[in-house]
Structures are given as C-alpha cells and as structure tokens.
Image: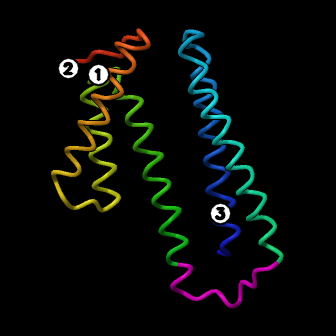
Amino acid sequence: MANWKRDSIVCILLLCFYVVMFVESIGLKQVARIYPQVLIILCAIFTVALLAKSIAARHREDTSTQSAEEKRVALAVIQDVAVICAALIAYALLIKVLGYITSSVLFIAVTLVFLRIKKWYVVAGISLGTTLFLYFMFNNLLGILLPAGLLI
C-alpha cells in the first residue's frame, strides 16, 4: 500500500472520529460545548489539510520503489490507529460504569503502555496527573460534574 493511501485512510478514520465527537458534544451545556467543538473543528481542518497533502503526494510517489520494510511500517501505523480507536470506544463505554477517574487512569495507562512507554513511574505519573488535573478543571473551574462510577 502506498504511503498516500495509508495517510488517506488514517485521515478518513480521524475525520469520522471527529464527526462522532462533534455530534456527542452537542448534548453538552452551552458553556461546556464551545471548547471541545473548537478543538474538534481545528483538528478536522488540520486533518483535511493532511488529507489534501497525501492525495497530492499520490502523483509524486512511485509504488514500485516502496520496499517491504516501508509496507510493514505502513501496516503497523494503521494497526496502531485501529487499536487506539478501539481503546477510545472502550473508554467511552467504561466511563459510565467505572466513572471518570478510574476509567481515565486505566485508559491513559493502557495507551501509554501500548505506545511502548516502559517506565512505570512515568505511566503512573502521567495517568494520575492528567486525570486529576482535568477532574479539577471540570469540577472546580467549569462546574461540570464528571461521571461517578462503581469504584470512584
């Protein structure tokens, strides 16, 4: 598979994800809806630009010169994106059962381990720190209660 095809597939998957996230954000309160929607729109604009760049590269790329190693790397990138998307779906489903704190720490830790972060204290620090920081921001500054679950 040529690089432009791989990039195009990843961009299309990301755009689909952005559409789902934008539709889900519509149900939020007006004050809480603006920030995520702006971020989603910015990400979509950059992704469309990347998609246009990858389609333009189609004309410059000769698929016969692509080595077996490049093809293996291209397939690995697509597999990584698919695993992260599956983890996001699992996170969205688990947040209602386990609650924000537990599911977020679990999601971030699993994602970091999947991305080959080996040091346990880095994984624990980033997972806990990010989750608690966002919890504080939403609860105290924005006044938005995050889902509580069975554990926390």
Q: Earlier in the sequence, mark 2 or mark 3?
A: 3
Q: Calculate the distance from the C-alpha at mark 3 to the C-alpha at mark 1.
A: 35 Å
In this rendering, the count of numbered labels is 3
The one nearer the camera, 134 or 12, is 134
Answer whether labels 1 and 2 touch (C-beta < 8 Å): yes
State the residue at coordinates (75%, 85%): 62
Look at the numbered disc 1 and give the secondary structure of its residue: loop
Q: Amino acid at mark 1?
A: Gly
Judge from the rendering whether residue 143 lies leftward or rightward of residue 26; answer left or right.
left
Judge from the rendering whether residue 59 lies leftward or rightward of residue 105; answer left or right.
right
Number of residues whose C-alpha sits closer than 10 Å to that of mark 1, classed few (under 14), some (14–19) or many (20 or more): some
Which residues make up the magenta segment?
60-71
- Asked if the stretch drawn in magenta spans residue 65, the answer is yes
* Relative image position of residue 46 (x, y in whole percent): 68, 48
State the residue at coordinates (62%, 17%): 26
Judge from the rendering whether residue 8 lies leftward or rightward of residue 107; answer left or right.
right
Q: Earlier in the sequence, mark 1 or mark 2?
A: 1
Vertical arrangement, residue 36 with respect to residue 10, above or below: above
Q: Amino acid at mark 2?
A: Ile
The one nearer the camera, 112 or 63, is 112
Q: Earlier in the sequence, mark 3 or mark 1?
A: 3
Look at the numbered disc 3 and give the secondary structure of its residue: helix
Residue 99 - label: 1
Q: Calculate the distance from the C-alpha at mark 2 to the C-alpha at mark 3.
A: 39 Å
Residue at which label 2 appears: 152
Q: Amino acid at mark 3?
A: Asp
* Relative image position of residue 19 (x, y in whole percent): 65, 34
Q: Which image quarter is the N terminus in? A: bottom right
Residue at which label 3 appears: 7
